[in-house]
Image (cartoon, rainbow, N blue to C red):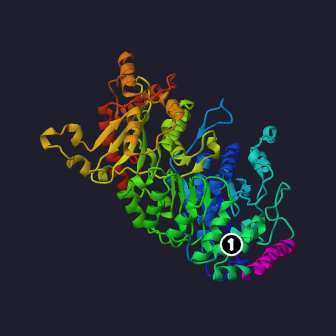
Amino acid sequence: MGRRHQAFVIARVVPHGAKDASGRSKYRCIAAYHHQQCHGRLALQGLSRFVTLLKQKENAEVVRAEIQSIQGKYGRWTQEPELPDVPCPFTGSLLGMAWSVDKGEEDPERPPYMSGVTFAWSVLPADSGPSWDRREDDGISIIDVTEPESPAYCLIRAEGRRHPVDAQGYLRYYNHERNSGILPHTLDDIPLVTQDVLDEVWPIQDKEQGMDAKSTETEEGCTPADAGDPEASMVDALIPSLAQMLLRPALDQAMSSGYTSNIERLLSQPEKAHQIRSYLRHQKPIPSNAVSLLEALLADEQGEAVDLSGFDLSTNQLLQVLSSRKGAVQALNLSFNECITSESISHLLTTFPTLRRLVLIGCQSIKEADLFDLLRNKPKLFYNLDTLLHPSLLDVYEPPRWPVAFTFVCTSLATMAPRMRGCCLPVFTPTSLLQSLLDLVEIAARCPPVYVSSDGGVAAQAVFTATRKPGQPFSERTLAAAPLFGLDAFNALGSHPRWTCIYQWGDLLDATGCQYTFIRYRSIDDIVNKDGDTKAQRTDEDQSPVKCYDLPGFLAALQTEGRPPAPDNLVAKLSQFLLSKEESERRSAEAPRQTRVPVPNLVGTPEERMLQMYAQGLETERQMLHIREDKTVAFMSDDEVKRIMGTMAISDMEYRLFGNWGDSK
């Protein structure tokens, strides 16, 4: 069912057992995604969106770090040690979100694109391999991200052949001759993944099909990804190595003597600065004498982002280096620092409250349990962060194992069986959250409700896992979290305080068609141990484990918690869609009350009665899924909140039993 398409991300990875990394890397698949309805131009648009996301610096640095983190650990395809199903979860998440959602900013006349259920439903094991012989599939996309900001690609047509073609060749297969010249500009000048690369990624399959592993045949006359003179490349690789050999004795002498001023004079030369950075990264740990040299190295770098990945700095050294920076640090990459621990993170966030983004890939000394305890017991440390990337927080596992700070739940009365979809976040800021909500309601406002009600889950995951700067388009967003969902209904009481937003898609009986509310789960201490209160003085609201807020109340509560305020212009834009409690009640009182189509008396045989019920259900859905002129979202009533929370509890139990969010029979 459907017109299926598969996307595979490949990269050069050193296989397990190689003595060293020099010249021993082999291509292998590191992420894969299945799309149930993707063919022709849709595949090219998904490919274009993925390439655009890869070229964003913040995304590229994490993709690069994930590739580095699996070097030398796993065998080649189908060989031991086996590769985990999702060895690079950030890269896989980026792929899935790119392939599933397009806000449609480049063409406001066309509705946004979204297709799929959720990320976890469609992600494939990286070692699954393409289904070359499944002719019912609508092709395969393959993207080489060895250098994320300079990717290569190819497509395989759905005809049982495995020759790589470019975008033009893929479209011609679908008889799009008239429009074959209209291609995503993002794919211009991107090299083609060649046949020999495919043979290296999936070598066993080559033998089964009797194909020549040395073949370099390509179609459409495209530029191969690895074109060039290998002898010239070897010479280019040797020259910097010789230069570094001459510099290394001077660096060793400076480290032993503690006198680095002569070395600092070389930092004005980009090539020397690069060699010095590489030298310092190989110092495990970095000696105290080298800290001043690292400070000088970073002094000339401009911007709010600092890349300290690969430097084994202690906690005190890290604080010293960051304190030497003139401007505020908002983004910090500490990947592959083997010295810092969760206690270091606590000191870091306390000393530098301006931090918004923290990347911790490959930090072996930050233990999962310690990080989770920090998130659970000291949530205020993370109030200024909108991005926290650590392998434990990216692991594709539902419901999430980490403490959830915010959950977005979307459900719909516009379908015969209620579904629960959404996204969970380990950290958030009011700014990132409001921008995500604004993106979602803007997508919903331009889409027919039938698409939103069925595919709203994947749209929610795309917007809530994203951050972007003011004025930056959605297509150039940065992935800030893994697109995961879970309903922790049974564990809400007694756990750390956290927020949930419930968003219900259109119902014919509602004044505006959609409803929302923000809910704050409270801990037992908040409910039972209120200082100065006696039991007789406590109200029902004091005893309730949850409290509901409209948008103004939600923002006021976040400010009371101590979170940074969101920009006024962002609040104003979102307020045009999310109505306050008072405005919702006024509109509801003034709007004419509509009623559902009455259920007729069922007559005839059981089969005939079943057909009548089915026809009635279709008519009810048809009425509820019509496109409304009013795009605002009303505040949800207390009775509706209670009903949905009951459904959430059932869905949570259903998932634990059957592995489905409201979709099992």
In depth, the one of 564 and 422 nearer the eye is: 564
Which residue sits at x=57%, y=43%? 115
Instruction: Verify whether residue 248 appears in magenta.
Output: yes
Magenta stretch prevailing secondary structure: helix
Residue 13 as seen in the image, left or right of residue 538: right
Q: Nearer the viewer, residue 226 or 619?
A: 226
Q: Is residue 62 left or right of residue 532?
A: right
Residue linked to disc 1: 278
When asked about the image quadrant of residue 141, the answer is bottom right
Relative side of 238 to 290, left or right: right
Front residue of 316 and 102: 316
- Label tally: 1
Give x and y (percent) for residue 480. 54, 52
Q: Secondary structure at mark 1?
A: helix
Quadrant hosting residue 126: bottom right
Q: Is residue 26 above or below residue 130?
A: below
| Type of amino acid under label 1 | Ser
Position of residue 626 measured from the top left corner of the image (x, y, whole percent): 50, 26
> Residue 392, position in %: x, y?
47, 63
Q: Is residue 574 above or below residue 181?
A: above
Number of residues whose C-alpha sits closer than 10 Å to that of mark 1, classed few (under 14), some (14–19) or many (20 or more): some
Image: magenta residue range: 230-249
Q: With respect to residue 621, does 374 lie above or below?
A: below
Question: Where does residue 41 sit, x and y in percent of width and height?
Answer: 71, 43
